[in-house]
Amino acid sequence: MHLMPKRSLALLASLAMGASAISAVPAGAQVAPHPVVTAKLAGGNDHASFTGVVNQEAGTLCYILNSAAIAPASAAMIRDGDGNVLVRLAAPDGGSSGGCMDVGADLAAAMVADPSAYEVAVASEHALGGEVSGKLMG
């Protein structure tokens, strides 16, 4: 089982909430979490992991993608069940990538409602369709 380092989880939380939102929350206050989607990517001799926080109201996705063995990774994406690229992610440079992006409220809600309808893939120059890929899980 691959566990995400605590600093990666803290970074993901910071990205998802925004630094100003974190400092604006009073100590001890309860904050409603945004849904989290994950994926375990596999293929060939490599494996990777994806963790995303979905803000349905804002239509945003904040994520961390770890894929150390694919070098160089040329692209990363979220695709629908027909293989259509819906979201272009930053390719893991040096083993990881991450950030926040607008995905639209409709797609954000759809990913939360049925995460298994989507997959994350990381491509290399040797496997443009995806050297590793895996279905999202809620």
Image (cartoon, rainbow, N blue to C red):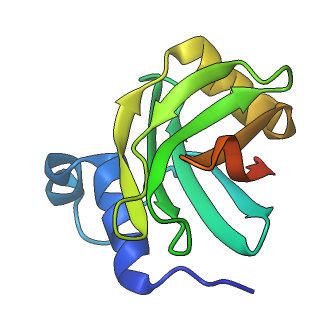
Name above or below for residue 55 compared with residue 76: above
Q: Nearer the viewer, residue 60 or 64?
A: 64
Quarter of the image where the N terminus is located: bottom right
Side of 128 where 10 appears, left or right: left
**Residue 5 at x, y percent in the picture:** 46, 85
Name above or below for residue 85 compared with residue 119: above
Q: Nearer the viewer, residue 99 or 30?
A: 99
**Residue 56 at x, y percent in the picture:** 54, 27
Residue 138 seen anywhere in this rendered image of the structure = no
**Residue 123 at x, y percent in the picture:** 59, 46
Side of 124 where 21 appears, left or right: left
**Residue 116 at x, y percent in the picture:** 85, 40
Tell which residue pokes out farthest to the front in this image: 126
Tell me what residue is drawn at x 53 percent, y 42 percent: 76
Tell me what residue is drawn at x 79 percent, y 62 percent: 43
Residue 70 seen anywhere in this rendered image of the structure = yes
